[in-house]
Amino acid sequence: MRVIRKATYEEASKACAELIASQIRLKPDCKVGLATGSTPVGTYKALVDFYKEGSLDFSRVVTANLDEYRGLGGDHDQSYRYFMNTNLFDHVNIDKKNTFVPDGLEADAVKACTDYDAILKSLGHLDIQLLGIGGDGHIGFNEPADAFCVNTQCIDLEKQTIEDNARLFFNGKIDEVPTQAYTMGIGYIMKSTTVILMATGAGKKDIVEKAFTGPVTPSVPASILQLHPNVVVIGDEAAISEKVVAAAD
Ligand code: F6R
């Protein structure tokens, strides 16, 4: 595990964007796994800046997102497809046909998951996967459970996740937060050649420490990343404790 600890959110975002940009420059047709939420907004902004400066080309990049709310279509301003379009895809030269997000409007949950797994299988493994971490340790929307879920699944969101999402999104209206989501499974996340987990803010400090210095357990889904051979934890000083820095290889 590598740990990159920066003083501020902006610096951590820039460092995260640099890692993703380096991967794209090294392999212009690389496959990149993307996350939504408040954490990666600064990273996407920095990637857009690189593109506008002319130092980054997305024309051959393929992306796969971690998750989507069940019941929301891409036109809904709280859907993750909409988030990706407005924060990144609309501002760079990516071909949207090469950007994949689970289909939130597929009501048949089994079909939605099998369809997304078929897409992921056709992509093969990802070169780099960006993750955030939930307050309960979730990655994607793989919530704490009795076992690590390998494939795409339809998940009932935990109360804490719904509250966190209402606070940051949905204009605080908890009743409007969907209660279920489709999420890439942990098996596929673990197949990515490189995994970046980004965490910022004091609210993430305890869970990051638990995930990277505690036992590997499905009750803290992010803890499985301790077993990944090439994981980078990036964050600000508020989120990354000395104990996590000391746990780095
Ligand atoms: C979003 C996702 C989630 C978030 C996590 C942290 O695609 O997969 O795991 O990364 O909930 O969210 P923020 O960044 O809003 O704290």
Image (tube, rainbow, N blue to C red):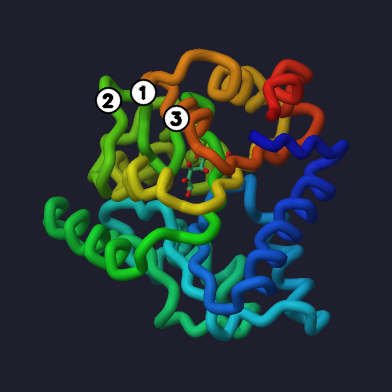
Q: Disc 3 marks which amino acid?
A: Ile
Query: Dot 1 corresponds to which residue?
Result: 218
Q: CA distance from mark 3 to mark 2?
A: 11 Å
- The picture places residue 177, in percent across and down from the top left corner, at 38, 43
Residue ID at (33%, 43%): 187
The quadrant the N terminus occupies is top right
Q: Is residue 23 visible?
A: yes
Up-down: is 161 above or below 243? below
Residue ID at (82%, 80%): 53
Q: Disc 1 marks which amino acid?
A: Pro
Please tell me the numbered disc located at residue 140: none
For this view, does 86 lie left or right of residue 234? Answer: left
Q: Are marks 1 and 3 in contact (CB under 8 Å)?
A: yes
Query: Dot 2 corresponds to which residue?
Result: 147
Q: Are marks 2 and 1 in contact (CB under 8 Å)?
A: yes
Q: Secondary structure at mark 1?
A: loop
- The picture places residue 190, in percent across and down from the top left corner, at 42, 44
Q: Secondary structure at mark 3?
A: helix
Up-down: is 228 above or below 249? below
Camera-side residue of 166 and 187: 187
Q: CA distance from mark 2 to mark 1?
A: 5 Å
Please tell me the numbered disc located at residue 224: 3
Residue ID at (48%, 73%): 62
Q: Disc 2 marks which amino acid?
A: Ala
For this view, does 238 lie left or right of residue 145? Answer: right
